[in-house]
Amino acid sequence: MTKEIVHIMNNISSWLRYQKQLGVEIIPKGPELSAFLNHCVKDETSLQGLTATREYGDEIPITTGLDELRKMIENCNRCELHKSRQNIVFGEGPEDARLVLVGEAPGREEDIQGRPFVGPSGELLTDMLNAVNISRKDVFITSVIKCRPPHNRTPGHEEIAACSSFLSHQLRLIDPPFILALGLVAAQTLLKEKAPLKSLRGRFHQLGNARVMVIYHPAYLLRSKGSWQRELKRVAWHDLQILEKEYAKYR
Ligand code: URA
């Protein structure tokens, strides 16, 4: 079998598992499935994204522990964000956490305190975790980039690239069986994907030794309004429950 066919089969099986989780039992070959199959063949990025195993970056020597890594980031000036930051936000939690949460970037409150998810979206995140019996103190929480972008704008590609080996190294050292990607930036960065969040969420993706679940970012849930917000929260709750069911086996 060629590599490409293996890629396509992995994509199809991942998509079918997702459909099963949604309760779908019969798949007619309608336009949606045809479009999906075409997408598999044409889009190399998505082929890489959904297939079995990707390696973490190797740039930082494995002998570099978390404390040393934190010092490296404190001294980092790889991108312009070091000029405006008050603090780096390295992340926090047990070094042997079985679940690592990856957000997008520190916000205002995180920049002031140097701690992840301590602002309004952090409050919602803590409530969401509690709702599925996951204790915040048991998980390691970090973000794709470690310095706050001015006005909380979305981090640029160069900023993400400059920071990516730090996140890779954190994941390599902690080596969790589960990762929860919060929002599109975390999902696309971790999975090397370009697909929209709605097609990535709600199912596990394999990344090295870890299974990655993708959910909507709490800040996005907070920004949404009315029935749309209720729907997004319902979906996030559904996705967290899938994660919790598997994570519970490792606790
Ligand atoms: N949003 C993130 O993605 N990370 C934080 O630390 C805070 C808000």
Image (cartoon, rainbow, N blue to C red):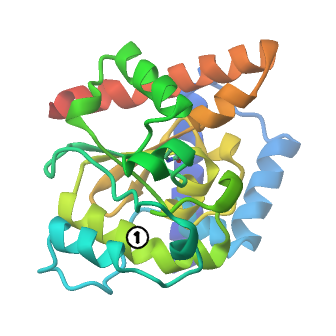
> What residue lies at 54% left-to-right and 53% top-to-bottom?
104
In the displayed structure, 66 sits above or below 105; it is below
Nearer the observer, 249 or 95: 95
Q: Is residue 46 visible?
A: yes
Q: Please give left or right for residue 124 compared with residue 52 in the image.
A: right
Within-10-Å neighbours for mark 1: few <14, some 14–19, many 20+: some
| Number of marks drawn | 1
Rendered location of residue 231, percent (x, y): 71, 17
Q: Please give left or right for residue 199 compared with residue 74 in the image.
A: right
Q: Residue furthest right?
A: 31
Q: Which residue is mark 1?
A: 54
Write down the quadrant of residue 7 in the picture: bottom right
Q: Please give left or right for residue 66 compared with residue 134 in the image.
A: left
Nearer the observer, 74 or 6: 74
Rendered location of residue 117, percent (x, y): 44, 39
Nearer the observer, 14 or 226: 226
> What residue lies at 69% left-to-right and 64% top-to-bottom?
40
Label 1 SS: loop
Amino acid carrying mark 1 in the image: Arg
